[in-house]
Amino acid sequence: MAALSVERHESMLLSANTSSGDETWRAMQADIQERIGNAGYALSLSSAVGEVLPDHLLIRVSTAFAARRCEESFADIIAEVARAHIGHELPIRFVVDEELGKVQEGEQDRYEVEILRVPPPPSHGVRARIENNLARKAIFNLDGTRSREMDSPATEDLVGTVALRHTMGELGALEMDMLTWVLGRWKRGENRLAFSKRQLARDLGRSWSGRTGDELTDGLLRLRHTTITGRRWLAAEKRHIERDASIFQEIIIDEHRESRDGRATTPAQVTVVLANWLADQLERGQYADLEWKTYRHALTTPFSRRLYHVLECEEGRQDGTLVAFRVDNPLMAALGTKDSNPRRLRDRLEKAGEMIRAARPHYVSITVDYDESGGEWWLNARRSPDWIRERAERRRQETWRGPRPSVIQAVARVG
């Protein structure tokens, strides 16, 4: 969350009738309303007027209560929507102008509330995230066939052995992208993630319809009802560990309708509660941050996105500049394919590697090489030293984020 500083501001208040807000603000309003819900919007922002100025976003609200509520509950949402529409971070300034809430004319006492949002360090556009174990486990089937069998046979992957139970069918490319997007909304100290289905659909590049909403609901429930049983042999400790776990502990979909079977009157709001083990892993920093635009739009195939998962979750050797995997069945299982044609697999890896290199310049080379001494094929990814430095910077940002102090200073002005 962004830090706040508050300063006394002596400029004259803008009158409510001088401007109705610019077009950018009007475009933002629908997204803000969708994000915070009709009730919150009606209470705090229904009469607000916004203007995008060169050095800040000015939002005039009708009461000091509305300003406080916006600051305490909606400031991050407004900042995120503003960044999406404007293209960069801007300080946000709230000004209380009681004329906005009145129809009669006359001089009134006014209050100015100024909240200067200090822009955080560059966020690298992080909107996606994958936990390390989920990147390495064979939990997705990206070959385009979705089995509805209750249980899958045990499979060797990059971590150990995995078996899945899925009552709604296997997890595919849609669920992989949904999981990556949902985890991107996680913040330290939180295991409940809230969003709307329309937000998710928009970022997945899908036009909204009832069918789209149903597909997203099915995908979320499929993730919820998939159980992962993993086994690992710790040779050094002479221990065999088996763990049975889910990804999500609970999913709540809240939708207001005119009647039980009527049409929805508000966008469906979703709350995902992460499983305890997953929340703990994220708190420990066991994840990779992914820039959503790169992940979802520059990497145009599910296979390339899954390979990106695997590579980004590996610390690598030689100070993070080298990642190497034997091209074998465990790697292919983790990448979500059951294709057993060796030449075709190598071609897929090389094409996916080229796509990642084009989208992510920190990858100097991604090649599939034959090791004559061992008679094996290896996937070798070489990264620049900037990769590890950027990763460290993102970790510092996550540590820097924390509960944002709520500081509001009101200066009484008599008209």
Image (cartoon, helix red, strand yellow):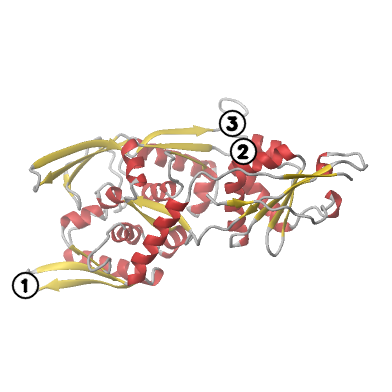
- Which residue lies under the disc numbered 3? 256
Element on which disc 2 rests: loop
Q: Nearer the viewer, residue 329 or 407?
A: 407
Residue, x 40% and y 42% (percent of image)? 219
Marks 3/1: CA distance?
65 Å
Residue 294, x across and y down, in percent: 43, 63
Q: Given the image, on which type of amino acid does mark 3 rest? A: His
Q: Nearer the viewer, residue 387 or 202?
A: 387
Marks 3/2: CA distance?
11 Å
Residue 158, x across and y down, in percent: 20, 53
- Which residue lies under the disc numbered 1? 373
> Which dot marks residue 37?
2
Q: Nearer the viewer, residue 11 or 143?
A: 11
Element on which disc 1 rests: loop
In the picture, measured across the screen, residue 120 lies left or right of residue 413, that is left
Residue, x 61% and y 36% (percent of image)? 266
Q: Earlier in the sequence, mark 3 or mark 2?
A: 2
Q: Earlier in the sequence, mark 1 or mark 2?
A: 2
Residue 391, x across and y down, in percent: 37, 61
Residue, x 76% and y 43% (percent of image)? 47
Around disc 2, counting alpha carbons within 10 Å, would you say few (fewer than 14), some (14 to 19), or many (20 or more)? some
Locate residue 316: give its quadrant. Answer: bottom left
Residue, x 42% and y 58% (percent of image)? 394
Q: Given the image, on which type of amino acid does mark 1 rest? A: Ser
In this view, 46 is above or below 250: below
Q: Given the image, on which type of amino acid does mark 2 rest? A: Gly
